Image (cartoon, helix red, strand yellow):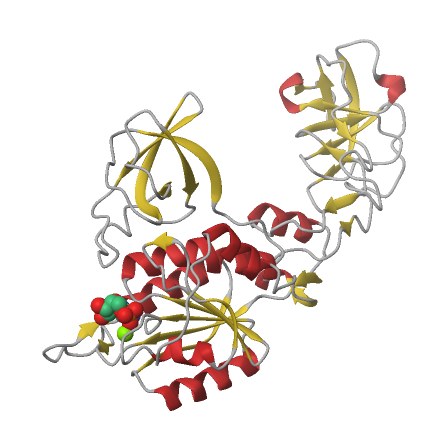
Amino acid sequence: MTFKRDAIPYLEAQNRLMSQIEELEEERISLYSSKGRVLSRDIVAPFDFPYFRRSGYDGFAITESDDHVYPIDLKVVAEVPCGETYEKTLKPGETVRIMTGAKVPRGADKIIMLEQSKVAEQPGHIRLVNTQPQSNITEIGAEFRFGDVLLKKGEKIGAGAISLLAAFGVTEFDVIKQPKVAIFSTGSELVSPFESLPDGKIYNSNEALLRTLVEEFDCMICMQEALPDDYQLTVQKLTEASQVADLIITTGGVSVGDYDFMADIATQNEVLFNKVQMRPGSPTTAIRFQDTLIIALSGNPGACFTGYHLFALPVLAKLSGKTSPVRQVTGIMAEDYLKNNGYDRFLRGTYTEENGHYYVSLVGSDMSSSLGNLHQATCLFMIPRGQVGKKEGEEVLVWLLSSK
Ligand code: AMP
Ligand code: MG
C-alpha cells in the first residue's frame, strides 16, 4: 500500500504524543506494593513524632532538682528498656535506668549517659559523676508535628519514603495508577530466544529490550506478544490490547515494505505522525487506535532503543505522573563525527562529566541495526541535520539515560 508520509521534526512528534495523554487517575495501594509509584496527594503526619519523650542515650533519667552538683548518688527505682514504660512520676533523689529510645518517665528532665555513672557505695544506688548541658531527651513532635506534610503529591516512592510511612503506621494511601503497557514485536522472522533458531529467522531482541525498559520504569506489562507479519492478526491483537492498555508499543513493520502492516494499519486510523526527521527510526509512527495510543517503533534494534527513549518513555512518565528519567543537557563532542545527513541523527554514546561539562562520544556502531552498544550507551546525542557532522569541542544536545 502506498500512502503519503510527511516527515516532522522529533520535537513536533514528541509534542503531538504528549498532547494526547494525561496523568492516570489515582488508586489506593498498600505500603509494600508502593515502590516506584507516585503519590497523588500529600500525606500528613497522623501524630506527633516522636509521640512520647524519648531517651537519646543509654543512661539514667533524673529530675531537674538533682541536676546541680556532681557527683550525686541517686536511688535506682526502675529499669526502662525500649518498649517499656515507668508509670510513676520520677521524684527528686530517684533515678531510672533507661535505654536509648525508651520513654522518659514523667518528672524526668535529663538523661545522664551511662559513661558518666559509677557504682555507688549504698546498695540500690548509682553515682552520677558528670553531666552535659543538653537534656538528651527528644521531645514530643521534635521531628514532625501532627498534620505536617510527610511526603508531597508527585513524590516517587522509594525505600526512604516507605520507611517514613511505616514509622507512622500508614499502610494504605493514594497513588497514580501504574500505566499498563502492551508490547508487540512484529515480524515473521522473529523467534523467541528460548527456542531453537531455524535458518533465516532471528531471535527477538526488541521484546527483551522493551519489557526490561518498561519494567525498570515501574510500569505494568499487560500484554507481550510476538506477531507474524499478518494484517488481520495484528489488528485483532491491537484491538484486544486497546481494551486494557494505556499505551501500546510495537516494533517492526512501519516501513514501506510489502509486509509492513503496522504502516497499513496506521492509514486506517487516526495518524499523529508517520515519519520523523530523524535517524535511526525515521518511519516511527504514532496512531490513535480505538482510543489507545500506539507508538510504532522501527524494528531495527538501535532505532527501537532510540525511539523508546525519545517517544515512549516521556509518554509513560506523563501517564505515571513522573518526570522523565531522561535528562536533556548540552554536551561537548569528545571526538569528531563528520557524517552528514538530511535528518537529525541520534547517536548512542557514552559521556564523562568534568567540571560540569558533559563530553560525549559515539559508542559502538551508529547503524540502526546494531545492538552491541545498547548495553554500553549511557546517553543519546544528536547531530543536527544538514550539517557536516560535528567536530570535537562543538556543542550538541545530549539525553542522559538512566539505564543502559
Ligand atoms: P522492520 O522495522 O520490520 O522493517 O525491521 C527492520 C529490521 O529489524 C529487520 O532487519 C528486522 O529483521 C529487524 N527486527 C525487527 N523486529 C525485530 C526484533 N523484535 N528483534 C530484533 N530485530 C528485529
Ligand atoms: Mg518487519
* Residue 388, quarter of the rendered image: top left
Q: Is residue 192 left or right of residue 177?
A: left
Of residues 18 and 71, the one nearer the viewer is 18
Measured as percent of width and height from the top left, residue 336 is found at 24, 31
* Residue 111, quarter of the rendered image: top right
- Where is ligand 1, by quadrant? bottom left
Q: Is residue 84 left or right of residue 346?
A: right
**Which residue lies most toward the left here?**
199
What residue appears at the point 49 percent right and 81 percent down from the top-left corner?
A: 241
Of residues 384 and 44, the one nearer the viewer is 384
* Residue 370, quarter of the rendered image: bottom left
Position of residue 134 relative to residue 329, above or below, is above
Measured as percent of width and height from the top left, residue 322 is found at 59, 53
What residue appears at the point 36 percent right and 87 percent down from the top-left corner?
A: 231
Of residues 80 and 388, the one nearer the viewer is 388
Measured as percent of width and height from the top left, residue 78 is found at 77, 37
Q: Is residue 85 visible to us here?
A: no
What residue appears at the point 29 percent right and 46 percent down from the top-left corner?
A: 341
Measured as percent of width and height from the top left, residue 384 is found at 37, 41
Q: Quadrant of the N terminus?
A: bottom left
Q: Is residue 171 left or right of residue 178?
A: right
What residue appears at the point 31 percent right and 46 percent down from the top-left corner?
A: 348
**Which residue lies most toward the top here?**
69
